[in-house]
Amino acid sequence: MTSVNTNYGALVALQSLTQTTRELSEVQNRVNTGLKVASAKDNGAVFAIAEGQRARVASLSAVTDGIDRATSVIDVGLSAGEAVGDILKQLKDKAVAAQANDLSQDQRDALQADFNALRNQIDQIANAATFNGSNLVNGTNLTGGASAFSVLTSDIGGTAGAYELDGVAFATLYSPSATVETANGALTVGANDVISFTITSGNETTTFTVDVDATDTIQQFVDSVGTNSGGRVTATYDDTTGKITYHSSEDFTVTYEDGAGAGVDDDGFFDGTNGTTGTSFTQVVAPGTGNNQLTVSGFDFRLGTAGQALAGLTSSLDISTANGAATASDAIDTALTNLNKDLATLGAQSKALDVQKKFLGKLSDSIEAGIGNLVDADLAKESARLQALQVKQQLGAQALSIANQAPSIVLSFFR
């Protein structure tokens, strides 16, 4: 049927041209943005996944920034510790020089003045080693306290692979400054007693040993766990519950060995039944809920601080006599040894943060690549499709023009 009211051919041509124009607009948008999923209307499910992963990349960037700040805090502490070490070596030089018997009193007084001037610089260095308000070497961020320095190492809380072992409460609760040997025998520490932590990673097994002395304070023992393990195992003491808790990101085995070979009570060190005795106690810890923070060991490099590296380096040291100089020399040797142990711990923790930062960088890159796989457009393919659609659009417009001319044939019927 021929009609001037309804032109079916034009309708079909118009529908085809409209579809081509719609597809052409879609391809042009992909070419312009480089994305095949630029908004939720393109593909709602994929867009939601991509947005979630973009949010995680942003959070990983924030965590990395935090690690950078923490690394700077540790680096400042290391610089201060190295400066203190240099001063200790100069003090050692003065103390040794003062042990000579051929010095006059004036010469000894001059050495003492130099000694005092150098020693007084140590506290200034320790207090000045602050970055972004945090100081790891003046006692303000000691591990185990409310102000312990913690670093966010992941964007996800409760990460798998964190391990903990809780001790049983000591029979008598103590502050961290109390000795580990209890008054009523709940924990008896003898000579040569040690605690060993064994970590197996792949084919490599490493054992760290912590000497336990009855004269050590609980805080000293807690600090020595992290120091002797290079930060791979840390310990904290809760003076409310009286418990020591061991933490590690790796599966570890812990053993208490009695150096005397006699039965020992391990309560307080391990989670066991009260009264359990034996020369060795081992427990492999199951994975816990984990955490996303690393507690950095803080120290106090100031003069004469009890339980810290320079505890024996006090204002009472006097090198104005040969005997006093010998005593000062021994105190400086002890301070240097303890200081170097603390610096080794800080260095190990800085390295651990570097490893975590590298991992987060690789993780972020992998997530971004995954987002690209989901939403990025194949521009080579889209370019070819763009040219095809442009030709198709031109043909569609031509077909519509021809279809619109069809009703004009009706005029010939009236000539």
Image (cartoon, rainbow, N blue to C red):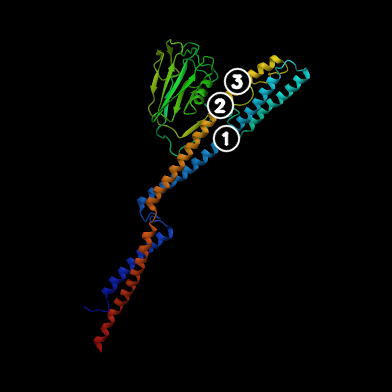
What amino acid is found at the position of numbered circle 3 in the picture?
Thr
Quadrant the N terminus occupies: bottom left
- Residue 59 % position (x, y): 47, 43
Quadrant the C terminus occupies: bottom left
Which quadrant of the structure image shows residue 346? Answer: top right
Residue 5, label in figure: none
Task: Give the crowd class for mark 1: few <14, some 14-19, many >=20 residues within 10 Å.
Answer: some
Q: Nearer the viewer, residue 68 or 219?
A: 68
Q: Is residue 309 visible?
A: no
Q: Are marks 2 and 3 in contact (CB under 8 Å)?
A: no
Residue 351 sits above or below residue 44 on the image: above
Distance, label 2 to label 3, CA atoms, is 13 Å
Residue 293 sits above or below residue 278 on the image: below
Mark 1 element type = helix
What amino acid is found at the position of numbered circle 1 in the picture?
Asp
Task: Give the crowd class for mark 3: few <14, some 14-19, many >=20 residues within 10 Å.
Answer: some
User: Residue, x 32% and y 76% (percent of image)?
Assistant: 401
- Residue 30 % position (x, y): 40, 59
Residue 334, label in figure: 3
**What residue sits right under mark 2 in the picture?**
342
| Residue 119 appears left or right of 27 | right
User: Residue, x 66% and y 18% (percent of image)?
Assistant: 328
Q: Across the whole image, how many numbered discs are drawn on residues? A: 3
Q: Is residue 246 visible?
A: yes
Task: Give the crowd class for mark 2: few <14, some 14-19, many >=20 residues within 10 Å.
Answer: many
Q: Are marks 2 and 1 in contact (CB under 8 Å)?
A: no
**What residue sits right under mark 1 in the picture?**
75
User: Residue, x 36% and y 52% (percent of image)?
Assistant: 44
Mark 2 element type = helix
What amino acid is found at the position of numbered circle 2 in the picture?
Asp
